């Protein structure tokens, strides 16, 4: 039998992931706390952090701001497609590597669709500062799903050709049943998941509107999960619609009520994208791309992240009219519930 | 239907893309111009076209406007089925997607696409000359949609003999049964739409073949903008310029803000 000499796990191994759950307090208790407390308690230097959302939709922006204020070193980040959450963590590394650093990224996509490329990704990748492992959206989603299912891998129809298989830990085998080639993608079991949802109760039962992205799988695969929510609702509300619970309470360790927690990205039924601020944030990296200093980016962080105590203070920096306009824009998107 | 003389390269791409889509089929829609082409098809010859978005929206009417992301709230309103990424890709893997609409930064003669990096792979992988966004769902769509429609702006730097990196597999090296032997599903690249014309892929060789020429272009001008030898169909059809009505739909109804179709 082939021995898996080249195999390595970047979060928890499947056995360790199981052990983490066995030893975890799975009781139905009040898990509400501050973001400061949640980030300090559940994230460690060197952790593999599973990032929820999809591009700029329902990304855990408030959690990334608090992570930047706390400071972490040598993180591995795992996601399918990310935008602003990735940018905020990466930008912190560009400002001061001794205070915040990312060692490795396992990803399918890091950019902003209609808002363009990520200047943070280009800067860090093109200067060789982070280790990369490229996958596809389905590969990363299947990896989290394998982790959530308690399996070491899932068989998938991609990647079997091109250069993605040799960029990562995919194994291509001959299927024992069909005789055709098929890919096996290894499970991803992050140390901690960071996820923003539409609503949660104090025990951590979460309801997601619009895309689930891969949030349920990431939460179930991870050893710990921090959840921020637009609305903190009574347990009676979630219990009345149990099939609307996308993430069940035993998978959640911290519940933090953070309205606008995915802003300036979008959140279904709450607010649409603030494209102006995305561009404003990206523009602060411009001098660094020309070989210049990080002053502009540092002043952005000093103003919007280090200069505030909480994410509420960050939101207070936007004019009320702008926040209301972004809420109104989203309300036009939601003629029918889904 | 009056033909227009005043249209942009992106507008003719959108019109060509919409015409390739067939009514009552399922199309897996990537971000950008494919969204505009899908909406145009729905408003013209294919009202029963069913869009699927990788973030998990199945069959939305797209009646609340052009999405600016494939996970946009606008893709979920009125959708018949709303899940996440795994569900969308599992359905595609199962064979529910008749068409997939994908793009890339570079393409070779077999319809293989690069959207990962410019530079030397594998030696320069960890420090690329230019880092692109990465596969997203494109390589999954390339592996599992029944037929893919590719969109790439046409110039010599993008139409290359050798790609820096193969993100989304097309007809691979063009050898017989290359896709099947590699473990891929579906027939692979079906049409390529560029800023200069429309191409199919010759069945025997898997090679890019010019089948339709956009106004103002010739076989020679297109070959001159291509970094490898093109095949040319025996009977080339000139592609008509967009009609005034098509342009009105794109400019006024579908993308009035110029999010993807720049003014």
Image (cartoon, coloured by chain):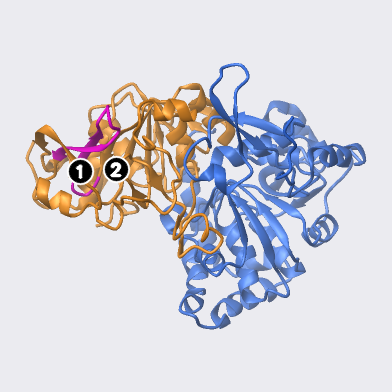
Label 1: which secondary element? loop
Identify the chain of the residue marked 2, using the numbered disc in the image.
B
Residue at left offset 50%, top offset 43%: B71
- Cα–Cα span, label 2 and label 1: 8 Å
Residue at left offset 73%, top offset 63%: A74
Q: Estimate the x, y position of residue A126 in percent, counting from the top left.
A: 52, 67
Point out the stretch of residues depicted in magenta. B194-212
A293 lies left or right of A184: left
Nearer the observer, B229 or A312: B229
Any magenta on residue B202? yes
Q: Residue furthest front?
A: A1
Considering the image in quadrants, where does the C terminus of chain A appear?
top right
Q: Estimate the x, y position of residue A130 in percent, counting from the top left.
A: 62, 63
Q: Are marks 2 and 1 in contact (CB under 8 Å)?
A: yes
Q: Which chain is blue?
A: A
The disc placed on residue B109 is 2
Q: Estimate the x, y position of residue B199 in percent, counting from the top left.
A: 22, 38
Chain B as rendered: colour: orange
* Mark 1, residue position: B230
B57 lies left or right of B228: right
Any magenta on residue A219? no
Residue at left offset 72%, top offset 52%: A49
The verdict on a common chain for dots 2 and 1 is yes
């Amino acid at each position: 039998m082939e021995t898996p000499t080249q195999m390595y796990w970047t979060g928890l191994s499947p056995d360790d992931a199981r052990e983490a759950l066995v030893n975890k307090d799975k009781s139905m208790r009040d898990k509400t706390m501050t973001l400061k407390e949640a980030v300090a308690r559940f994230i460690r230097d060197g952790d593999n952090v599973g990032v929820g959302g999809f591009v700029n939709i329902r990304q855990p922006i408030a959690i990334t701001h608090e992570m930047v204020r706390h400071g972490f070193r040598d993180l591995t980040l795992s996601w399918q497609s990310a935008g602003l959450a990735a940018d905020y963590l990466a930008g912190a590394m560009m400002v001061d590597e001794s205070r915040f650093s990312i060692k490795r990224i396992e990803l399918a996509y890091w950019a902003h669709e209609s808002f363009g490329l990520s200047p943070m990704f280009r800067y860090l990748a093109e200067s060789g500062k982070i280790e990369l492992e490229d996958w596809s959206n389905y590969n990363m989603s299947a990896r989290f799903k394998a982790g959530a299912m308690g399996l070491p891998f899932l068989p998938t129809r991609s990647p079997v050709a091109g250069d993605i298989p040799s960029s990562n830990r995919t194994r291509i085998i001959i299927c024992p049943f069909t005789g055709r080639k098929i890919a096996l993608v290894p499970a991803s079991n992050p140390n901690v998941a960071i996820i923003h949802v539409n609503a949660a109760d104090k025990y951590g039962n979460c309801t997601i509107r619009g895309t689930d992205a891969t949030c349920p799988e990431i939460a179930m695969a991870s050893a710990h999960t921090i959840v921020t929510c637009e609305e903190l609702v009574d347990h009676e509300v979630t219990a009345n619609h149990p099939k609307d619970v996308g993430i069940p309470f035993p998978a959640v360790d911290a519940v933090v009520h953070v309205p606008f927690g995915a802003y300036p990205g979008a959140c279904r039924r709450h607010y649409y994208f603030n494209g102006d601020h995305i561009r404003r944030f990206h523009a602060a990296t411009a001098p660094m791309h020309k070989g210049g200093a990080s002053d502009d980016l540092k002043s952005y962080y000093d103003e919007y992240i280090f200069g505030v105590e909480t994410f509420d203070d960050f939101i207070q920096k936007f004019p009320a009219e702008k926040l209301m306009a972004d809420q109104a824009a989203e309300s036009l998107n939601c003629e029918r519930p889904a | 239907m009056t033909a227009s003389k005043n249209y942009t390269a992106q507008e003719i791409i959108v019109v060509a893309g919409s015409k390739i889509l067939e009514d009552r089929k399922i199309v897996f829609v990537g971000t950008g111009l494919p969204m505009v082409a899908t909406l145009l098809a729905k408003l013209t010859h294919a009202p029963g076209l069913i869009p699927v978005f990788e973030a998990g929206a199945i069959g939305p009417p797209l009646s609340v406007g052009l999405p600016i992301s494939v996970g946009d709230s606008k893709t979920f309103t009125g959708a018949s089925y709303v899940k996440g990424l795994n569900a969308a890709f599992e359905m595609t893997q199962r064979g529910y997607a008749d068409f997939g609409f994908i793009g890339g930064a570079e393409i070779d003669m077999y319809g293989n696409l690069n959207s990962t990096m410019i530079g030397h792979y594998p030696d320069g992988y960890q420090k690329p000359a230019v880092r692109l966004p990465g596969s997203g769902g494109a390589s999954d769509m390339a592996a599992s949609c029944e037929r893919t429609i590719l969109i790439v702006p046409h110039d010599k730097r993008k139409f290359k003999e050798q790609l820096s990196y193969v993100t989304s597999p097309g007809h691979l090296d063009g050898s017989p049964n290359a896709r099947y032997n590699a473990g891929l599903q579906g027939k692979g690249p079906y049409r390529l739409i560029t800023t200069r014309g429309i191409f199919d892929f010759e069945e025997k060789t898997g090679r890019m073949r010019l089948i339709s020429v956009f106004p103002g272009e010739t076989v020679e001008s297109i070959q001159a903008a291509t970094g490898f030898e093109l095949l040319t169909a025996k009977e080339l059809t000139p592609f008509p310029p967009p009609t005034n009505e098509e342009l009105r739909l794109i400019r006024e109804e579908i993308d009035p803000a110029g999010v993807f179709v720049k003014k």
